Image (cartoon, helix red, strand yellow):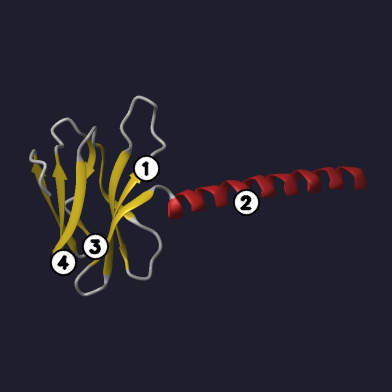
Amino acid sequence: MPKVKRRYAGALKLAGTVVTIFGAAILYLRLFAGTVQQRLPSPDGSMVAECRVLGFTAATDSPATTVQLRTKFNPFRHTVFSGLLYGGDVNISWADSGTLVVKCHRCSNADIRGMEQKWNTVSIRYLMTESNKP
């Protein structure tokens, strides 16, 4: 009997280690994935908007661009805009404390994956332009 218990204990330790490593990898990617292009706090400082470029797409695809919102003290972000822009670019700005403006330049060929209109207390406006001027 003692050998059987040791075998189960070893299997449980291995399973626990695998789950811990997998969880740590997911947490790391969730918090630190991508390159921050812009980071803007809201005028009242309660929210933070970030524009990130995620480079881990297929070789034939454009890097994924996202706009994410989070509250001031929360490290976990919520994606409100995402897409493959194929040469386009995104700029963000705050119209006021409750309105985020997302400007997408040269986005006619973009593959937009998500465009939320509201998150938490923030309304999101989108301006799609074809000009090269931000």
Instruction: Tell me if mark 4 has few (under 14), some (14-19) or many (20+) residues whose alpha carbon lies within 10 angstroms of its own.
Output: some
Q: Is residue 1 visible?
A: no
Residue type at mark 1: give it.
Leu
Q: Mark 4 and mark 3 in contact (Cβ < 8 Å)?
A: no
The CA span between labels 3 and 2 is: 31 Å
Q: Identify the residue at image location x=35%, y=24%.
A: 60
Q: Which residue is mark 3?
A: 120
Which residue is label 1 attached to? 54
At label 4, the amino acid type is Gly
Residue at screen point 29% across, 43% down:
65
**At label 3, which amino acid type do we have?**
Asn
Question: Where in the figure is residue 87, as x and y percent of width and height?
Answer: 22, 34
Q: Residue furthest top?
A: 60
Image quadrant assignment for residue 107:
top left
Residue at the far bottom: name it: 44
Q: What whole-number distance in Å separates the C-alpha atoms at marks 4 and 1?
A: 26 Å
Look at discs 3 and 1 and give the one toward the viewer. 1
Label 1's element?
strand
Q: Badge 3 local density, few (<14 within 10 Å), some, or many (20+)?
A: few
